[in-house]
Structures are given as structure tokens and as C-alpha cells.
């Protein structure tokens, strides 16, 4: 993945065999390897029998990439969780501060949907602005990371649209819970002290 595949020739040299590649179709791999070792020791007793599986070799070769993917996924999920908790706290605080306003609006005829829209629009605007701010650095970092690969994909704009929609969905889901709760409170309770 990191280096281009150069043109390759594989000359046949039956008397100077260093590697042998086999495709094994067996349920008992240990017995098959033992049989291959017996044949190897009979044909090339002067060379030690050392074997490895191609999928294990590939996994070792790309272990750092797999580790990076796991770390990136873990920390991304953690960041989303922390951001959602912060957003929930901010939505709770905002709803608490606007309790009397919500009560007056409900007394004057506002329905739950309009209250939810009122409380959510500022947060949705914040998420949209943050997406606009975060997209250029994200594009730059992704391009820099992909430069390390010989065969790379082009970054399409729809990736950022999809990420933005996911962020917006998470934000709306987080905010809606608190907004609906605030909108369903009896206005008499919020206006009683006035």
C-alpha cells in the first residue's frame, strides 16, 4: 500500500528453490504442514523448513495501519461522546435559563414543535458553522495522510457532506431530548413564581 508495485519477473530455477508458495485446502492444517515438511526435508535436506502464512505476513506488514485505524476510531468515538455530553449540558442549561420564556410562549399558544425549533435552531447553527470551520483542515490532514500511500483514493466532497449530516443528526438527537422535555413542562409550573 505504501510503495508502488514495480514490474516483476519470476525466473524458474528448479535447483535453487528458496521459497515455495502453497494453497492449502484442508481442515487439518497442522497435518498438512507436517506432510509438506516431510516432502521438503526429502527434497532439500540441506535447507531448514521455515513456513509462514501469507495472511499473517500481510497482517504483520500492515500492523501499524491497523493499529492506527483502531486508535483513530476509538478516539473519534470518545470525542463524539464528550461533544454530545457537552452539547446536552449546554442544551439543559439553555432550557433552564429560558423556562419562563417557554412558559409564556406556551400560554400564548405555542405548540411543542415550535418550542423545540426555538431551542434547537441556535445549536443547529453552531453545528453548521463548526462544520464549515472544520472541513478545510480535515481535508488538508486527510490529503497529507493519503500522500503516504502509493495507491490512494481521491477525497470526494460527499464524504464531508456525509460527516456533516452525521454530526448534525447526533447534535439534533442530543438537543431534541432536552428541548422536548422543556417543551412538555406545564407552563403553570414555570410561571408560578411570577
Image (cartoon, grey):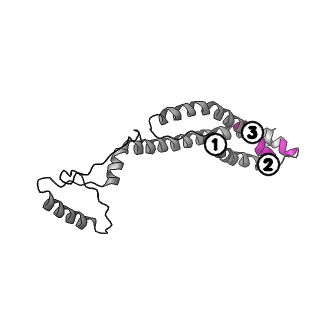
Looking at this rendering, what residue extends furthest in the left direction?
A: 46
Which residues, given as a range, are shown in magenta?
A: 105-123
Q: Residues within 10 Å of mark 2 (few under 14, many from 20)?
A: few
Q: Quadrant of the C terminus?
A: top right
* Residue sitting nearer the eye, 48 or 133: 48
Q: Is residue 135 above or below residue 21?
A: above
* Sequence-earlier tag: 1 or 3: 3
Horizontal side of residue 158 vs 30, given as left or right: right
Rendered image: mark on residue 158: 1
Q: Residue at x 25, y 66 (%)?
A: 32
Q: Residue at x 66, y 48 (%)?
A: 173
* Contact, mark 1 vs mark 3 (Cβ under 8 Å): no
* Sequence-earlier tag: 1 or 2: 2
Q: Main secondary structure of the magenta part?
A: helix
Q: Residue at x 65, y 45 (%)?
A: 174
* Residue sitting nearer the eye, 166 or 85: 166
For disc 3, the marked residue is 121
Q: Residue at x 31, y 63 (%)?
A: 24
* Residue sitting nearer the eye, 131 or 170: 131
Determine whether the residue tagged by mark 3 lies in a helix, strand or loop. helix
Rendered image: mark on residue 167: none
Rendered image: mark on residue 113: 2
Q: Quadrant of the N terminus?
A: top left
Name which quarter of the figure residue 85 lies in: top right
Eye-nearest disc, 1 or 2? 1
Structural distance between the alpha carbons of marks 1 and 2: 30 Å
Q: Residues within 10 Å of mark 1 (few under 14, many from 20)?
A: few
Percent position of residue 140, x then y: 55, 31
Looking at this rendering, what residue extends furthest in the right direction?
A: 108
Amino acid at each position: 500500500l505504501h510503495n508502488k508495485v514495480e514490474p516483476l519477473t519470476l525466473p524458474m530455477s528448479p535447483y535453487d528453490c528458496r521459497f515455495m508458495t502453497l494453497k492449502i485446502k484442508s481442515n487439518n492444517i497442522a497435518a498438512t504442514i507436517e506432510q509438506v515438511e516431510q516432502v521438503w526435508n526429502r527434497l532439500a535436506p540441506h535447507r531448514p523448513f521455515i513456513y509462514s502464512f501469507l495472511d499473517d505476513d500481510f497482517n504483520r506488514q500492515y500492523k501499524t495501519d491497523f493499529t492506527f485505524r483502531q486508535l483513530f476510531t476509538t478516539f473519534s468515538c470518545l470525542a463524539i461522546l464528550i461533544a454530545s455530553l457537552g452539547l446536552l449540558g449546554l442544551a439543559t442549561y439553555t432550557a433552564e435559563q429560558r423556562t419562563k420564556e417557554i412558559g409564556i410562549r406556551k400560554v400564548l399558544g405555542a405548540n411543542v414543535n415550535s418550542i423545540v425549533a426555538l431551542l434547537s435552531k441556535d445549536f443547529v447553527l453552531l453545528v453548521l458553522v463548526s462544520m464549515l470551520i472544520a472541513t478545510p483542515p480535515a481535508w488538508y490532514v486527510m490529503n497529507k495522510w493519503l500522500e503516504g500511500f502509493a495507491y490512494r483514493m481521491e477525497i470526494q466532497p460527499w464524504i464531508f457532506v456525509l460527516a456533516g449530516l452525521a454530526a448534525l443528526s447526533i447534535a439534533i438527537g442530543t438537543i431534541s431530548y432536552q428541548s422536548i422535555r422543556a417543551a412538555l413542562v406545564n407552563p403553570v409550573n414555570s410561571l408560578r413564581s411570577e
